[in-house]
Image (cartoon, rainbow, N blue to C red):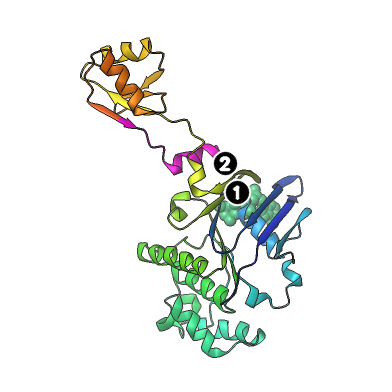
Amino acid sequence: MPTGAVIEFSSITKRFGAATAVNDLSFTVEPGRVTGFLGPNGAGKTTSLRMLLGLVTPTRGTATFGGLAYRDLPHPLQTVGAALEAASFHPGRTARSHLNVYAIAAGLTRTRVMEVLTLVGLGEHAGQRVGGYSLGMRQRLGLAYALLGDPGVLVLDEPINGLDPEGIKWIRGFLRQLAAEGRTVLVSSHLLSEVQQSVDDVVIIARGELVHLGPLSSLDTDTAPQVVVDSPNREALSSALAAAGISFVAGRTGLLAAAPDPGQVGHVAFAAGVELSVLHRQKVGLEESFLALVGGGRSL
Ligand SMILES: Nc1ncnc2c1ncn2[C@@H]1O[C@H](COP(=O)(O)OP(=O)(O)OP(=O)(O)O)[C@@H](O)[C@H]1O
Ligand SMILES: [Mg+2]
């Protein structure tokens, strides 16, 4: 079973002329977990991954796999599988012939080529020219290429883009399985909702800088808790809350009270003899927390 290496970004910066695409970014990605690398369009995700894979030279800082830069890996294809955005495959060649070239170069067998094509659901299309592939099929081919050397580390840039609902469900399960096998899985997306069901950890960047890092669950713990409460007599409820010093605003489904515990709000209403029609904790969606963190994003 391949073992995953720790990916480490250390103070990495990339400037393109006067523009800073990535600024002093540091974080690690652990094996055995799926890490979502998130940020809005133009945040610097692809640039960071390209630096990690040695395709772009950092202005400053390093990005390594188990302490080694990509170019120093003795067996790159067997160590790191990468599928970057807009993978370009020659349209006139078949999926099988594409992968055969890489397989031969890396000392892998042709059997492995058919194995990975079948694994990503392209077994029946292996002999088809890539020019006729849909976006989703090209994504799957990119993934097949990444898996060719059975690597312990997978770096995937927006792998869900272009997949249909069935493909999305499949890749979510697939990422989980790869991590469960002990691999390091780093997967980028500009949408949290796209990867929310498959990631353990999130690294969120905006305008080239780190804005949040931690387990997925850490995303909504920072937001102030609120309680939704309503009454057939909203006026009496408002007075009771005000008298108890609980601030509130009128929301769509009731009053949004700045209180950590629904029980406390219920007690205030009970003590004031106010009947309640609604009382529950407001669940702040992860997506809302994500959007609050990344702000307006970069104007492209
Ligand atoms: N080769 C380049 N030359 C000049 N600027 C670049 C280059 N590559 C990227 N940039 C700029 O760097 C910034 C980050 O781009 P990047 O592609 O890394 O973002 P991203 O997070 O991958 O966005 P998306 O979600 O749209 O894929 C953008 O402002 C982009 O215009
Ligand atoms: Mg990108």
Q: Is mark 1 within 8 Å of ligand 1?
A: yes
Q: Are marks 2 and 1 in contact (CB under 8 Å)?
A: yes
Q: Which residue is mark 1?
A: 42
Q: Label 2 is placed on what type of residue?
A: Gly
Q: Secondary structure at mark 2?
A: loop
Q: Position of residue 158 (x, y in %)?
A: 53, 59
Which disc, if any, is residue 297? 2
Indicate yes or no whether the magenta region holds residue 284.
Answer: yes
Q: Label 1 is placed on what type of residue?
A: Gly
> What residue range appears in magenta?
280-297
Establish if 30 lies above or below 190: below
Residue 63, image quadrant: bottom right
Establish if 142 lies above or below 28: below
Q: Nearer the viewer, residue 207 or 28?
A: 28
Indicate yes or no whether the magenta region holds residue 100.
Answer: no
Disc 1 crowd rating (10 Å Cα; few below 14, some 14-19, many 20+) is some
